Image (spheres, rainbow, N blue to C red):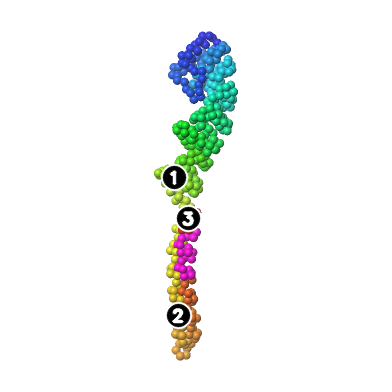
Amino acid sequence: MDEDVEKFVSKILAELNIPLAIDVEEKLDLKEDDREKIKFAMSKVDTADTPFQYSISNANIYIKLGVAAFDDRDYRRAVRYSDKALKIDPNNMNALWCKVNALFKLKEYKKAVRGYDEIINKGMDDERIWFYKGNALMQRKRFDRAIECFDKAIQKNGEFVEAWLKKAHAFVELWEGEKARECYEIAIGIAPKSMEKRDEKLKGLIARAKDKSVSYYYDLALKINPEYVGAWHELGSMHHRLKDFERAMQCFENAEKIDPDNKEIKEIKEKCLTEWNEVRKCSACEGSGECSNCKGSGECEVCDGSGDCCICKGSGLCAECAGSGECDECAGKGKIGFLRKCSKCSGSGKCKKCDGDGMCDICNGTKKCLRCDGSGDCIICKGSGKCIECGGKGIKE
């Protein structure tokens, strides 16, 4: 390449203090004019007739150009410049680092994982490498392997909050809610602001649950944070819509325990309970809870609770002859006048109703109501006045 181009590009890179390495989420502090200068320098390099000579200094020019391209989100160009630097110096870690991070940004995660492995094998074994490798594996849905990488990062730096959070996210994807909760709690212990990341993940799960109308996303969210009122509320609402009132009520009650002053939860709970009671209303008492036989009085419907025979009114005497045993037509004589035989008693002189013994023909002198055997209680509800089908609750459990 023309020596003047090399000097020109080197001068611009030096003036702007472009570093030899950039992290994945790092941004260079460059003004718009500075970025235009770099783009002009890149165009000079790209249109040059011959590449730079094979020297470490020229490899560094390519690396810095790669870093500038990465910062400008021109990841393809960053890979191209990094490859040119690696052609000059195959073991240059800065060039390899820039290339691999650019591959990650290009969503070429399989190549990125191989690149991070190469960096590790060449001795650059710090927590960031394991962390970014884990991220790439997460994107490839290799969650078990990603967790291994995050563990490596945490072994090297136990307070690496982002590694704890990503490990928690991996456990979420594996449906291991309890393990995810442990990781989130550690991260929150190190940096309380991590709670925002956890809650953001929980909101994502709730959104998925609402979209699919399935409970397992809610269940997972509640394993991660059992005190998540929103999850209990939404899970209860889902069961309510599906007419699974019992589960819905359990969810609303759990939400109410956590947030007892939440008016919205109270209102939907009451609505759910009303609908549930209507569905499970006892058909025997129509929801009143009263015995249909005695209408809730608990009394025998024949004797009105007195326990007395309804015919003799508790006297035990024949209602027709008042206990005398005599025919009331002939006064026990068997005749009407001197000659005519009494037609009512056929001349016997005995009361036809009690056959002359004077006792009530219904209770046989016991004085007791035959319906309730003298107890005065309704024979269906045994005096409780409650519906025997629902136990007086008006609803069937």
Q: What type is the residue that disc 1 sits on?
A: Lys
User: Is any atom of residue 241 visible in this view?
Assistant: no
- The circle on residue 323 is 2
Secondary structure under badge 1? helix
- Label located before the other in sequence (3 or 1): 1
x then y, percent, for residue 248: 48, 46
Q: Which amino acid type is marked by label 3?
A: Ile
Cα gap from disc 3 to disc 2, whole angstroms: 51 Å
Choose top left, top right, bottom left or bottom right for residue 93. Answer: top right
The answer to whether residue 191 is above or below residue 341 is above
Mark closer to the observer (3, 2): 2
Q: Earlier in the sequence, mark 2 or mark 1?
A: 1
Taking the view exactly as shown, the residue that stands out farthest to the bottom is 338
Q: Badge 3 is on which residue?
A: 395
Q: Which portion, as a residue range, is magenta?
A: 371-390
Identify the residue shown where x is 44% and y is 79%. Answer: 322
Residue pictured at 45% horizontal, 19% vertical: 30
* Label at residue 164: none
39 vs 279: above or below: above
Viewer-side label of 3, 1: 1
Mark 2 and mark 1: Cα distance apart in space? 71 Å
Judged by depth in the image, the label closer to the viewer, 2 or 1, is 1
Q: What is the spatial separation of the Cα atoms under label 3 and label 1, in whole angstroms? A: 25 Å
Residue 96 inside the magenta-drawn segment: no
Q: Secondary structure at mark 3?
A: loop
Q: Front-most of 151 and 260?
A: 151
| Amino acid at pointer 2 | Gly
